[in-house]
Amino acid sequence: DWTYSLVIPSTHPLCQGQPIDTYRSIHEAMVDAMGQQGVNAALNLSAQEDITPGVCFNKPELYDVVLKNFPTKVSGAAQKRTKLGFLMQGSIWKPTVASLEWNRFYNDFIFEIAKIAEAEIAYQSWPHWNASEEDQLVEQFDSEEWNCRR
């Protein structure tokens, strides 16, 4: 999978609408970014009659990304909203879009997200930690306490 996370503060216009509207907008940006490399993707526009959520990539939900003319689910996501804003976390099932050049897609997707968020793009390098900081992070996020908490 190729995964992503977006964190949007409650003061941003994207946070003012309904969750389904944000879901659709983000996935439209993804479809546009994929289309720049010739991937024939679209939004799934049919709502399932069964209200039970699908198991990840078993079936496309409303506004998931699918391949046109072939209802294979390409991407889906979930949102967590609080009074402070929301987190949207999603993934793309890479075998469905094997032709994508992922570094280019990354940049195109950021550009498309920036358009809907009305934001300027400011690239920053990935953070690098010294060995003790890295050990501390591994210890925290690899711990049973962290991974089993609710």
Image (tube, rainbow, N blue to C red):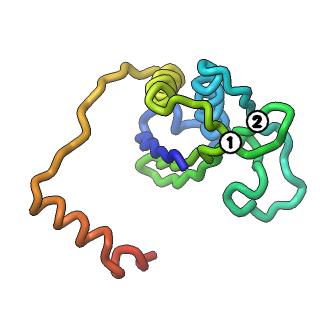
Q: Tell me the crowding category of disc 1: few under 14, some 14 to 19, or many 20 or more residues within 10 angstroms, Cα based.
A: some
Q: Is residue 27 above or below residue 128?
A: above
Is there CB contact under 8 Å for labels 1 and 2?
yes
Q: Amino acid at mark 1?
A: Thr
**Residue 138: image x %, image y %?**
25, 66
The secondary structure type at the circle numbered 2 is strand
Q: Earlier in the sequence, mark 1 or mark 2?
A: 2
Write the residue at 90% across / 55% down.
49
The secondary structure type at the circle numbered 1 is helix
Identify the residue under disc 1: 96
**Residue 104: image x %, image y %?**
47, 25
Left or right: 72 as drawn, with respect to 90: right
Along the viewing direction, whichever of 133 and 13 lies nearer the viewer: 133
Gap in Å between the C-alphas at discs 1 and 2? 8 Å
Write the residue at 35% across / 74% down.
146
Task: Specify the farthest residue to the front.
Answer: 99
The image quarter containing residue 54 is bottom right
Write the residue at 67% across / 58% down.
56
**Residue 137: image x %, image y %?**
22, 63
Identify the residue under disc 2: 67
Task: Specify the farthest residue to the right.
Answer: 49
Q: Is residue 38 above or below residue 149?
A: above
Number of labels in the image equals: 2
Along the viewing direction, whichever of 117 and 136 lies nearer the viewer: 136
Q: Amino acid at mark 2?
A: Leu
Q: Tell me the crowding category of disc 2: few under 14, some 14 to 19, or many 20 or more residues within 10 angstroms, Cα based.
A: some
Along the viewing direction, whichever of 64 and 22 lies nearer the viewer: 64
Residue 117 visible in this rendered orientation of the protein: no
Residue 140 visible in this rendered orientation of the protein: yes
